[in-house]
Amino acid sequence: MGGGNRENSNSQILNALENLKNPDSTNPQNPNSPNSIVFYSEGNQYYPTFKGILDFLDRFSYPYIYYTSSQNDLALKRDSANKSAKFEFIGTGNKAYTKLNFLKADMLILTTPGLNVLHIKRTKGVSHYCHIVHSLTPMTYRVFGVDYFDSVLVTNEIQKNFVRDVETAHNVAKKYIAVVGSTYLDELNKKYRSIAKDSIDSAESAFISQDSATFAESENPGESKNHAKSKNPIESKNSGKSNQSIESKNHIDSADSKDSTDSTNLAESVAHANPITLPDSSKKTILISPSWGKETLLSKYGLKLLMPLAKSDFNIIIRPHPQSLISPIERQNIEHLKEALGAYKNVIWDIGTPNIYAFLRADLMISDFSSVIFDFLCLAKKPILTLDFEFDPAGYDVADVEHFWTFEVLEQIGGKIKESDFENISEIIRKNLNSKAKSETIKKVRESLWRYPNIAGEMAGMEILKIHRQILLNRLGAFKGTFENLKKLDSVLENATDSAESTNFAESKDSADSPYLADSTLRVSIDSTDSTNFTDSSESISPKISPYSADSTQMQIGESK
């Protein structure tokens, strides 16, 4: 009987270890398989938040499922060699929520806040709920926004401190928090830099073409003066057309407080020639980029602010928030403003194009409380003026913390303007454009906001794998200690074998007849430093995961409560 129990015990350990090696296998030790890791996206505008993570997992063919509530989600068009990745449109509203509320998975990773408060509920079918933040500053979520998640992947230490403050205020257990950088900003930055480079190249090409045309005229005076000339796509002037309106056919598919066109087309090829043509390239350009709602810049102040700007010596780009085009009241107001400013040639309306084009044109931004403020700061590194507004924090997590970083820093990166300042807006703008002190402050704020630039996908992906590994280890239960001892034994035997081989005792390598040594399953490695598993030996990833020495005080991952 004792031998039978040992065989049964050994079999259970082998099954558990096989499950660690192949998380997608259907196994009694993992009743939630095959949905090991599941992502959920509310809409296409969130795809850039997930894209870098999916790219990372695809490099190692790690299994995952991606659910989306947008039929236009670019993830559904991914061309990946990862055959273990699955993508599915699960509908919208209650249909999607029902799917998620009956889900069986090791992890559910989502940008949607309000777990267990709004539509998506915690269930025993999901072992771990992970929230990934899709902004740069402390989150303005409704109350209890992240209280019931097991972990949060934040952009920077500022957000981490904010979550800790909210936990203290709400008297909830501390969750696992990892600073991973901004996945969506990394994607935005790729396009921003690409378009900026192509714009410079186009300008140089246009200059060379014009120079060549001048030379050709001198060689062939009989030819037309316009022959071989090309217009500079960056700096061409408005040909008598007043109040231009650049309007894209792309519309958002979800009403989100973030400017959805920030990222809707980032994974697709975008026009490298900037569609925004400045009326006068010799003048500075001011970008008006408000949020949406009745308390925002266009709705609350309208022509009181816009008319002094239209009469100024600046190019003015007005970029309404996409959500304001959905609201009938706000859209009617926008149409009224466009008509009132129609005679001013220096005013451009930018509607529906990715905001990086306007970022590239602008020298300064004026906004209210839109999250796009800090995207502009990090990418363009230029000053920002914000309206001095009263924010009612009732019903938001921010109401429960003593200091809110975002409001405190707005004064530092440009300054706040009151309604009484509108008549002197040109002077205020010039002062900020020429301020070296503001430039230094912007640099410091940018560094504190944008952590791990351009590797956030890898950072977030590694944190997800670390969490997943801990979930699987916890599932070993009573065998966890046995597994750890086996790992140590493997390490000792490997070192001993290497030592024996170095002293010409290689034959000892083949003398072991223990079933534990003979069975390769027991020597499976899921250390990220093992090139046969989580890392590709041809790639260098930093930092490396050290899952076998995980500090329990740093990561305490438990099953769903």
Image (cartoon, rainbow, N blue to C red):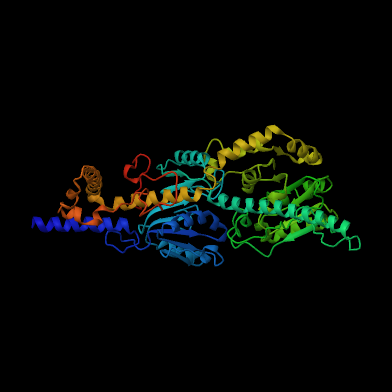
Q: Quadrant of the N terminus?
A: bottom left
Q: Could you tell me residue 238's position as x and y percent?
A: 83, 56
Which residue is situated farthest in the top direction here? 437
In this rendering, would 21 be left or right of 415?
A: left
Q: Could you tell me residue 246's position as x and y percent?
A: 74, 59
Can residue 31 be seen here? The reply is yes
In this rendering, would 471 be left or right of 160?
A: left
In this rendering, would 212 be left or right of 152?
A: right
377 up-or-down from 475: above or below? above
Q: Could you tell me residue 387's position as x and y percent?
A: 70, 42
Q: Could you tell me residue 178's position as x and y percent?
A: 45, 44
Could you tell me how many numbered marks the image carries? 0
Which residue is situated farthest in the right direction here? 222
13 up-or-down from 136: above or below? below
Q: In this rendered view, identify the residue nearer to me: 521 or 345.
A: 521
Which residue is situated farthest in the left direction here? 1
Q: In this rendered view, identify the residue nearer to me: 540 or 99.
A: 540
Q: In this rendered view, identify the residue nearer to me: 396 or 221.
A: 221
Q: In this rendered view, identify the residue nearer to me: 434 or 206.
A: 206
Can residue 300 be seen here? The reply is no
In this rendering, would 128 be left or right of 95?
A: left
Tell me the residue at 26%/56% (across/down). Answer: 16
